[in-house]
Amino acid sequence: MHTDESILPSSRKIKFIAVSVPCLLVLYVLSIGPVAKLDDCGMIGARAGNVLKIVYAPLALLEPIPDARSLFNWYIFRVWNCDTMGDNTV
């Protein structure tokens, strides 16, 4: 049986995906810092805040894990120097 090479993913595409997906996940998690800082400065309105709660809802799954919570608190409050975040902390 003849296989069409255009159907099979190239190793270049697989490598790109293998590198891109983890990088995007790391950027997603780290992006909570700048967002928290903008929220802390009052630059995020209520409507955008509601959208961001949905966007970052998956990170709330890490809340029961004490080490994850400590890491996020350190990242948000120490690295990004946020004073308060209301109910947006992970």
Image (tube, grey):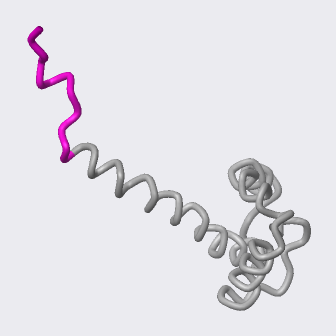
24 or 69, nearer to the observer:
69
Residue drawn at the location 84% of the way across and 74% of the way down? 85
| Residue farthest toward the right in the current orientation of the protein | 87
Q: Picture coordinates of residue 56 (x, y %)?
A: 71, 55
Residue drawn at the location 90% of the way across and 66% of the way down? 87
Looking at the image, residue 42 lies above or below residue 48: below
Instruction: Specify whether 75 is left or right of 8.
Output: right
> Is 6 within the magenta?
yes
The region drawn magenta spans 1-12
Q: Quadrant of residue 86?
A: bottom right
Residue drawn at the location 75% of the way across and 72% of the way down? 68
Quadrant in which the N terminus appears:
top left
Instruction: Specify whether 61 is left or right of 7.
Output: right
Residue drawn at the location 35% of the way across and 57% of the way down? 19
12 or 58, nearer to the observer:
12
| Residue farthest toward the front in the current orientation of the protein | 1
